[in-house]
Image (cartoon, rainbow, N blue to C red):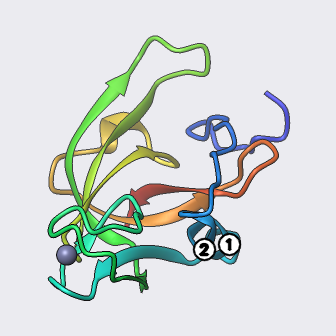
């Protein structure tokens, strides 16, 4: 473990793949801003960011900055790991979409379904920071 941090709950995360469809998201992430996509035609927000609305197939989708707050829908704790126990799961954003994410900066045993969490960004190895969630 190199420069990770002094936080024992932080584990290394590989750099995400950035493409044309998600470039704006990762650019905002570098500035600490969390973006989601919303459909102009049906009004629904979605995650992960896509050019085509997954609900109505409209191509009219726009970026929207989100506070990145929501509640844990479900989670799973990986206890047998070379980097120590960690947790992943789904967060239901206040805007509606569910985000598959890592929970960092918190002991897995402190998580619970329904717990209010907020996005923060963790550096990756050579790429933009990725959104992770921690209790508010
Ligand atoms: Zn739509």
Side of 41 where 6 appears, left or right = right
Query: Residue 43 versus residue 111: which sits nearer the camera?
Result: 43
Quadrant containing the N terminus in the rendered view? top right
Circle 2 crowding by C-alpha within 10 Å: few under 14, some 14–19, many from 20: some
Q: Position of residue 135 (x, y in %)?
A: 37, 60
Q: Pointer 1 and pointer 2: residues touching (CB < 8 Å)?
A: yes
Side of 89 where 71 appears, left or right = left
From this view, report whether residue 129 is shown above or below residue 60.
Answer: above
Q: Position of residue 4 (x, y in %)?
A: 76, 41
Q: Quadrant of ligand 1?
A: bottom left
Q: Residue at x 69, y 43 (%)?
A: 15
Q: Position of residue 80 (x, y in %)?
A: 45, 11
Residue behind mark 2: 24
Q: Position of residue 74 (x, y in %)?
A: 19, 42
Q: Residue at x 39, y 34 (%)?
A: 87
Residue behind mark 1: 27
Quadrant containing the C terminus in the rendered view? bottom left
From this view, report whether residue 136 is shown above or below residue 65.
Answer: above
Q: Secondary structure at mark 1?
A: helix
Q: Residue at x 50, y 46 (%)?
A: 104
Q: Secondary structure at mark 2?
A: helix
């Amino acid at each position: 473990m190199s420069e990770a941090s002094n936080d024992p709950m932080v584990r290394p995360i590989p750099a995400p793949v950035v493409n044309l469809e998600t470039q704006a998201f990762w650019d905002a992430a570098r500035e600490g801003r969390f973006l989601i996509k919303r459909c102009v035609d049906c009004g629904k927000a979605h995650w992960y960011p896509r050019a085509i609305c997954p609900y109505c197939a409209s191509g009219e989708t726009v970026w929207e900055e989100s506070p990145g707050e929501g509640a844990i829908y479900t989670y799973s704790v990986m206890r047998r790991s070379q980097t120590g126990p960690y947790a992943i799961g789904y967060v239901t954003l206040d805007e509606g979409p569910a985000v598959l994410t890592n929970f960092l900066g918190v002991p897995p045993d402190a998580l619970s379904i329904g717990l209010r969490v907020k996005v923060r960004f963790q550096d990756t190895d050579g790429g933009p920071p990725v959104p992770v969630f921690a209790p508010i």
